[in-house]
Every structure is written in C-alpha cells, then in structure tokens.
Amino acid sequence: MRASPGLGSRSLRAAILHEFGQPLSLEDVPIPVAGDGEVLLQIEACGVCHSDLHLVSGDWPAFAKLIRRPLIPGHEIVGRVMEVGAGVSANLRDTRVGVPWVFWSCGTCSNCLEGRENICQNRAITGVTVNGGYAEFMVAKASHVISIPESLSSVEAAPLFCAGVTVYRALRNAEVKPGQRVAIFGIGGLGHLAVQVARAMGAEVVAVDVDDAKLALARESGAQQTLNSVKKDAAAELRASGGVHLALVATPAKSAYDAAFTVPRAGGAVMIVGLPYELLTFDAVKLARNEARILTSVVGTRQDVRDTLALAAAGKLHCKVESRPLAQINEILDSMRRGGLLGRMVLVPTLEKM
C-alpha cells in the first residue's frame, strides 16, 4: 500500500483480517493514494454488518475464496473526499459520499446491461476483494461513490449502504403493494429497516422474532403486530389469519425459514434475505398448492442506494444506531455472535481521539 503524498508521512489506523476466525488486528498502515478515477476518503462512519462477521469468520466458503488477505473489512461507509485522482473532477473534493458493497461494476457484462450491476460478473466488492471501511482512510472509485443528503448524519447514513438498500431492493423486487400483509422474520439490523420500508410501501406488517426486546424495536419501527415464536406458534397464527402476501426472512436462522415457508397465502412468496449457514428444506407440494414463490435479492444497485437514502431523507426510514470507536471492533463482533445487539453498530474513527 503506497502512502498518499498529499498527507505526508501520516499513517492510518485500521482493523485488519489476517486469518479467518481470529480477532482483527488493529494496526497503523500508510494512507493509500487515489489512483486514476479514484478518490481518497477520510472515513466518518462505517457500519458493522452481520455479513462482516461471516466473512471474517470464514463461514461462507464461496466468499472465503474471494477474500484477499490481509484485508480491511467493512462495506457500509460514509466519508469525506480529501483527494481526487487523475480524471476525477476537483468538485468532488470535500463532499460527503458513501461506498456500498459493490465497490465497482463493469457496466458491460450481461448482468450490468440488464440493470443488475449488483451482481456484475466482474464486480469488485468492498471489504472483500478490496480494502473497506474499518479504517480512518480508504480509496474508492469516483464512479461508484454516492452523495449523502445533507439531512442525514454520516452515522445515520452508513448502515443504509447495505442493510437499508438490501431490504429496500428485496421489498421492491417483491412488488409489495398497499394493503398487502408482510411478515418480517428476524428483527435485527436488517429486519427493523424492512419493517419501515414495508410500511412506507403501504403494507400491513407483522414482525416475528424470539426476543421481546427486538419485537419492541419492531413496534417502534411501525409493525402493527408482533409475534414471539418461542411463546407461541407464530406460523400457525399467521396461517390461521389467512397467511401473508410476503414472508421476508431477515435472519440466517433455519428455524425462521422453516416457519416462513409455511405461511404464504395463495400467490404469496418467501423472500430470502438473511443467508443461512445450513441448506434449506421446504414442502414443494404445499408451496405449489398455493402457487407460492421463492424469491431472492442481494444488496442493490447505485440507484437503489439513492432511493433508499431519499426514503431516509424524507423521514420514512431511520436506522437504530450506536456509535463505537474502531478499537472496539472485536468486542462488537463477539456481541454479534451472541445475538446481543439491537439495531446497528457504527464505527466512528474520530471517537478514538476523544
């Protein structure tokens, strides 16, 4: 990593992955240089996504093959442009922008040409194939950074670059309509945002979880009904009341999927968002009997991110966040393993100096 000449011999503090399953190492490394078509960002906030926990633990074999090491994780990033590389407008300097999961997409493969740059065949992935935001500085592609509305703080905006856009695209792709009934399984960082997006689309929302504190968060987020699946058979209750148009699963728990596959009404659907550790099973006959569908969605395009930010700027989407210094990243990941967090943790590098 070459040091940035504009910032002299200064170094940046970063949390670095060397080996899967081991704590991240807090180290000082050179500030990188903005190359052709790139910008150098001073990071103001970076959300800690549940995907990061899987990635640093090596839980997802398909991604483990892609991960470069040593690696700075993090893909929910908001920062201020400090320097611009060749070919980048100087007007970008000092602007506040975000960096999502898709660090770069080619624009020429069949997926990009069909409007699916989120699954570009040649994409670079932030905090996976290139260094991400668990740091004080990073470089990003000028073509793929996204402006932040002035009404949103950096801490508020950061989780929207993955958690927010992921549920926005999933619900948009499911074509949720006003008056439809949507069940959200798992009310964590993704789930409480899914409740709000579904309500903004005019849906009636039922939240399902095993934790009363998370169900309280669902009610704060606008859910009209909450069901604790430990205290009652939530799936049976949903079926008895006519089923749902959409069951969106925002948790990797197989038990949530087992329940969700049983609740779609005729023509309804199950949306896979939370990525499970185990293979899923379902009763194909029962799904076919209702002409129920299984849908999938992954993160979003740059336009999806802009739409998500606009929803938040309009006051219709608000992530429950807690700011922490970068030095606490391993404690945060341990808390995530225990399932003990509400909402989203956001790393703020400047807190290190307070």
Image (cartoon, rainbow, N blue to C red):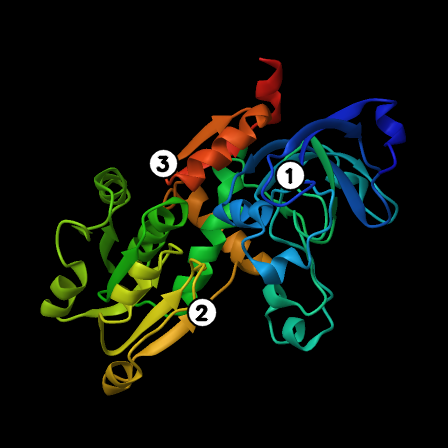
Q: Is mark 1 on a helix, strand or loop?
A: loop
Q: Where is residue 228 in the image (x, y as percent from the top left)?
A: 18, 49
Give the amino acid type for the residue marked by disc 2 in the picture.
Answer: Thr
> What residue is drawn where x is 38% and y is 54%?
251
Q: In which quarter of the image is the N terminus?
A: top right
Tell whether label 3 touches label 1 (CB within 8 Å): no
First in sequence: mark 2 vs mark 3: 2
Q: Distance between the residues labelled 1 and 2?
A: 27 Å
Tell me the residue at 33%/50% (across/down): 196
Question: Element at badge 3?
Answer: loop
Residue at 48 percent of width and 46 percent of height: 50
Residue type highlighted by circle 3: Gly
Across and down, in percent, residue 171 comes to 39, 63
Q: How many marks?
A: 3
Which disc number belongs to residue 340? 3
Q: Is 289 placed left or right of 299 in the picture? A: left
Q: Name the residue under label 1.
A: 133
Which image quadrant is residue 15 in?
A: top right
**Which residue bears the numbered disc 2?**
296
Q: Position of residue 35 (x, y in %)?
A: 86, 45
